[in-house]
Image (cartoon, rainbow, N blue to C red):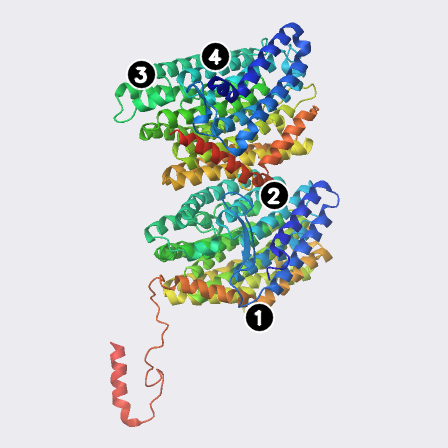
């Protein structure tokens, strides 16, 4: 009976696993011709998995009933909120992929490979496990399942040197990060005698032994790698630039949600008794990410690199919510994650829609000069997305920054909030550059490429979310995020 | 009153609908924009007519808990009413000013202006501090586009400077707002205006708000974005910038800094006075040597706004009333001066003063209007400028005679640079052939000039119409800040009258020796 209840709790993961395996076989026999069909099925499966979450997400779920397999996994509101975001982001990245791979941009290998949707499914499965893990073993299992799928996704254009390079870099640095993380876990195991979060937490109460402190720092460092937070962010611009754009869009959204949610779970559940120890680490990482993300982006000419730095900058704000170390901060962080996913997805979709005459992708500032004249609708959507990323009201990006700063100030961390918001002005500079290039410069290139309906739909949807109309979403979004945060703190 | 239709929301919806229509149908954007702004102006007139003088402090209030974390709360007092009237009055004129001069991307241009109008009404009527901030900051976006897309040669530099300067000023204010909301437990502006923050915290809060409003006003030395933005913006952009956006700083001081942090305001009053005195003298002198007409008027704006800040921090009724009237008057007059520059810029496409001359010969009507606004800018009695400056300087005299002395030189210097400008443009020989061939103002330009002229004269001759709605609110504010007023060095109370007049001539011969003795003292 207990076993059956555990299976019921992991229904979305079971669905993803089964579908992933079946589609893998279809891909093996059907070949690349079946790719489009597999993608459609994968999207359906992700929708289905997301649909399973809806009732519990709506009514909120927490407490002992959500613990599966004797404390290996926990499907509480917090995990469900993160999963819903991950599935939505994965769906977004799947439906924009086929036109990209069919176009000139994919180089010699035209056409989407059948493995692509399957890999996205497995990555989503890995992330699902990550966000519900309550044991270091399941945590690592999920993390590696996601990472391995991601390495392959980054280099999916095998004959494209940039893509291959991105995959290799991602793999080497990701393996290093996993090593650091594992080392930290082993130290914690040694000092506390357990791998499940509850045991480790009990072992870490009171005075923190030096070895346990090392364990904590190593775990935090490994997680910072996965989130791409300063000072472990170096791989991000290269990987984002090299990977195919739909994959970059995926990297910028779903794994970020998963890694941030995982970090939140670890710091509150495992290190809940040592708040001072991790709070300063997270606060430093947050401020450093905000500042370096903003400064690094200034000189960039490549749009994907620029968005990579922008994601580092945004992660800083998300971590600022985490560093507040209370329920309000966690709620703010979850709201920010939702808005961030919408903004990043929208920006990358807009980039995917900017094509030259032969379908080649436009990736640098000089390509999008005068876009407001040649492609006004895309330009206006990008304008909204960029101002939203910069946190300028009345766009929803402002609201997400508002809740983060409100939580920070209420926790009496005024000086950190002031530093972060001053640095956000630096960030505004390069988002303005987007607008300047599109609206103030004279058009040179001809942006002619036609875009699919999926692109338009996704672009309009994300723009609608970040537009002032998005504020009508805030009451229900806050409600969901509060339930998720309170579930997170129930264990703490 | 509130059971009627939500007029403030309606005033924002009309331009918003107009903006969307302009984006869709670029061909008829001019007429749509003009229609939308005129309808909004009529709604504004209805607002003024319905405003009950001496009634509740906050009228036309609307409240809806639509969002999480803050509410959609609107409402106005007399101060906000007057500033809203100024905004909706200037808007149709701005549209007319851009009628022919804007040729590219007209739909987007008009949409940007209409969105600007929505935001300005929102700023002045917001009753929730976070809602205020949203409108306040959002106004950067359309202005950034207006300067950047339709501006002059150096528009990109100017637009960046405008955006980043004002953004940096206001983000610190946002942090202060969060602290206040957390402390007071509400984001409702009327409640916050009555809340007593601890004096120690007031210092920091005041500085954070000052960072934002000082940039907006702009006060010396935070004014450097203004000449760039003014010079590069299209004519109508300059009008809105000078007419309404600069008033946001003054409005911020009167709505937030003074009532919410009275102790800190008193503590920093001399800081404000010193900056304002420097601004009055320094920027007036800088204005004197300008070759560019728009730059000259931009610097004169800094000088005039300095008298506003001095009046606000005088901590008495005259000072506050004077500051409000200067803000209204400056909105009309500097707007009109930018229009005057725009009229001849459209003909000759240069702002260089030396390229004009003797315009009163070939453009007599234009010269008359220009003269009137020049005089109003100087503060000639009978124009709106006089009323405001007189009240503000009378107010500051009660607090500090020295500040009054220094600031009054601003009027003399103002007369200097304005008359010098007028002489070089309108009088003298017609030294430039092309300038001499310019035609006098057209019907469209008549339509722009006449309403502003009427308003300037009305405010100059019968300022009571504009003071009456604000009187009760200023009295409430004065009462709130009176206890914190800084020490005064002037002695406006009547002293003991002398027995005799100083120059009384003695008629009796017998008193002569005494008289002689007195004069001998004087010789030493």
Tell me where residue B18 appears, x and y as whole percent. 68, 47
Mark 4 nearby-residue class (10 Å; few <14, some 14–19, many ≥20): some
Q: Nearer the viewer, residue B163 or A287?
A: A287
Nearest to viewer (mark 1 / mark 3): 3
Q: Residue at x 50, y 67 (%)?
A: B471
Q: Earlier in the sequence, mark 1 or mark 2?
A: 2
The residue indicated by pointer 2 is: B146
Q: Are marks 1 and 2 on the same chain?
A: yes
In terms of secondary structure, where does tag 3 sit?
Answer: loop
Q: Given this view, does label 2 or label 3 mark the residue nearer the observer?
A: 3
- Give the label, 4 or 1, closer to the camera: 4
Question: Where does residue A172 sit, x and y in percent of width and height?
Answer: 45, 11
Q: Which residue is mark 1?
A: B462
Q: Please state the chain letter of the residue tagged with numbered disc 3 in the rendered image.
A: A
Horizontal and vertical percent position of residue B516: 27, 86
**Labels 4 and 1 positioned on one and the same chain:** no
In the drawing, what numbered circle is on residue A171? 4
Q: CA distance from mark 4 to mark 1?
A: 78 Å
Tags 2 and 3 touching, CB below 8 Å:
no
Contact between marks 1 and 3 (CB within 8 A): the answer is: no
- Judged from the image, the secondary structure of the residue bearing numbered disc 1 is loop
Task: Kindly identify which chain the residue marked by label 1 belongs to.
Answer: B
Question: Quick check: marks 4 and 1 in contact, CB under 8 Å?
Answer: no
Q: Which mark is residue A193?
A: 3
């Amino acid at each position: 009976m207990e076993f059956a209840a555990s299976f019921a709790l992991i229904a979305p993961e079971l669905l993803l696993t089964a579908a992933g395996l079946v589609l893998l076989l279809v891909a093996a026999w059907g070949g690349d011709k079946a790719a489009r069909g597999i993608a459609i099925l994968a999207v359906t499966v992700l929708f289905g998995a997301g649909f399973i979450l809806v009732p519990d997400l709506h009514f909120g779920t927490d407490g002992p009933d959500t613990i599966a397999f004797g404390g290996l996994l926990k499907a509480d509101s917090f995990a469900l909120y993160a999963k819903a975001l991950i599935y939505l982001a994965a769906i977004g990245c799947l439906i924009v992929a086929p036109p990209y791979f069919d176009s000139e941009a994919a180089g010699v290998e035209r056409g989407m490979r059948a493995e692509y949707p399957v890999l996205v499914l497995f990555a989503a499965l890995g992330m699902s496990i990550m966000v519900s893990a309550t044991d270091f073993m399941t945590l690592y299992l999920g993390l590696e399942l996601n990472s391995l799928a991601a390495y392959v996704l980054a280099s999916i254009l095998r004959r494209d040197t940039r893509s291959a390079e991105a995959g290799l870099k991602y793999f080497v640095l990701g393996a290093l990060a996993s090593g650091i993380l594992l080392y930290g876990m082993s130290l914690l195991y040694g000092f506390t005698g357990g791998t499940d979060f509850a045991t480790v937490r009990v072992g870490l109460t009171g005075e923190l032994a030096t070895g346990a402190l090392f364990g904590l720092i190593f775990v935090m460092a490994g997680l910072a790698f996965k989130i791409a937070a300063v000072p472990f962010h170096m791989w991000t611009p290269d990987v984002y630039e090299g990977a195919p754009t739909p994959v970059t869009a995926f990297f910028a959204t779903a794994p970020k949600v998963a890694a941030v949610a995982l970090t939140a779970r670890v710091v509150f559940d495992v290190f809940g008794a040592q708040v001072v120890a991790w709070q300063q680490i997270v606060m430093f990482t947050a401020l450093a990410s905000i500042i370096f993300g903003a400064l690094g982006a200034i000189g960039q000419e490549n749009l994907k690199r620029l968005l990579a730095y922008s994601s580092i900058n945004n992660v800083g704000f998300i971590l600022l919510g985490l560093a507040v170390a209370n329920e309000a901060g966690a709620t703010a962080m979850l709201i920010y994650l939702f808005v961030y996913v919408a903004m990043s997805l929208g920006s990358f979709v807009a980039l995917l829609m900017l094509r030259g005459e032969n379908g080649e992708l436009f990736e640098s500032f000089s390509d999008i000069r005068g876009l407001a004249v040649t492609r006004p609708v895309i330009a206006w959507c990008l304008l909204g997305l960029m101002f939203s990323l910069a946190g300028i009201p009345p766009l929803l990006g402002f609201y997400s920054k508002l809740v983060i700063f409100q939580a920070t100030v209420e926790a009496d961390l005024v000086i950190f909030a002031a530093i972060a918001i001053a640095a956000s002005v630096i960030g505004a500079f390069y988002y303005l550059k987007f607008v300047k290039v599109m609206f103030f410069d004279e058009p040179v290139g001809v942006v002619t490429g036609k875009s699919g309906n999926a692109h338009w739909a996704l672009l309009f949807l994300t723009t609608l979310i970040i537009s002032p109309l998005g504020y009508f979403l805030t009451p229900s979004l806050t409600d969901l995020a509060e339930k998720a945060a309170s579930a997170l703190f129930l264990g703490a | 009153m509130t059971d009627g239709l939500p007029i403030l929301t309606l005033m924002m919806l009309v331009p918003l609908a107009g903006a969307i229509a302009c984006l869709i149908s670029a061909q008829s954007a001019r007429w749509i924009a003009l229609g939308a702004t005129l309808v909004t102006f009529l709604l504004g007139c209805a607002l003024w007519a319905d405003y009950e003088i001496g009634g509740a402090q906050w009228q036309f209030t609307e409240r809806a808990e639509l969002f999480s974390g803050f509410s959609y709360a609107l409402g106005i007092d007399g101060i906000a009413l007057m500033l809203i009237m100024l905004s909706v009055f200037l808007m149709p004129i701005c549209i007319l000013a851009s009628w022919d001069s804007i040729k590219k991307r007209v739909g987007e241009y008009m949409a940007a202006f209409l969105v600007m109008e929505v935001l300005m009404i929102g700023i002045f009527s917001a009753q929730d501090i976070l809602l205020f901030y949203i409108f306040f900051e959002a106004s950067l976006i359309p202005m950034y586009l207006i300067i950047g897309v339709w501006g002059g040669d150096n528009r990109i530099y100017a637009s960046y400077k405008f955006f980043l300067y004002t953004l940096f000023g206001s983000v610190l204010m946002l942090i202060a707002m969060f602290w206040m909301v957390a402390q007071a437990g509400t984001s409702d502006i009327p409640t916050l205006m009555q809340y007593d923050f601890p004096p120690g915290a007031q210092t920091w809060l005041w500085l954070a708000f000052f960072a934002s409003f000082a940039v907006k006003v702009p006060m010396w030395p935070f004014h450097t974005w203004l000449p760039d933005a003014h010079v590069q913006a299209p004519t109508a952009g300059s009008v809105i910038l000078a007419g309404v956006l600069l008033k946001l700083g003054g409005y911020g001081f009167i709505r937030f800094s003074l009532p919410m942090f009275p102790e800190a305001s008193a503590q920093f009053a001399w800081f404000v006075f010193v900056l304002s005195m420097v601004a009055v003298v320094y920027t007036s002198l800088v204005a004197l040597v300008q070759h560019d007409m728009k730059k000259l008027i931009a610097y004169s704006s800094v000088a005039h706004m300095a008298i506003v800040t001095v009046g606000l921090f005088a901590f008495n009724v005259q000072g506050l009333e004077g500051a409000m009237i200067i803000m209204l008057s400056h909105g009309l007059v500097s707007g009109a001066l930018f229009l005057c520059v725009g009229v001849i810029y459209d003909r000759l496409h240069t702002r260089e003063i030396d390229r004009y001359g003797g315009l009163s010969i070939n453009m007599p009507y234009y010269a008359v209007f220009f003269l009137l606004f020049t005089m109003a800018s100087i503060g000639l009695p009978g124009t709106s400028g006089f009323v405001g400056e007189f009240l503000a300087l009378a107010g500051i005299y009660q607090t500090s005679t020295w500040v009054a002395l220094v600031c009054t030189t601003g009027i003399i210097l103002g007369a200097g640079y304005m008359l010098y400008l007028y002489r070089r443009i309108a009088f003298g020989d017609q030294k430039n052939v092309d300038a001499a061939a310019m035609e006098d103002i057209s019907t469209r330009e008549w339509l722009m000039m006449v309403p502003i002229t009427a308003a300037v004269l009305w405010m100059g001759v019968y300022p009571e119409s504009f003071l009456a709605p604000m009187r009760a609110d200023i009295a409430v504010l004065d009462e709130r800040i009176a206890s914190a007023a800084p020490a005064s060095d002037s002695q406006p109370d009547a002293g003991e009258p002398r027995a005799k007049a100083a120059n009384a001539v003695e008629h009796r011969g017998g008193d002569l020796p005494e008289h002689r003795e007195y004069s001998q003292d004087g010789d030493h």
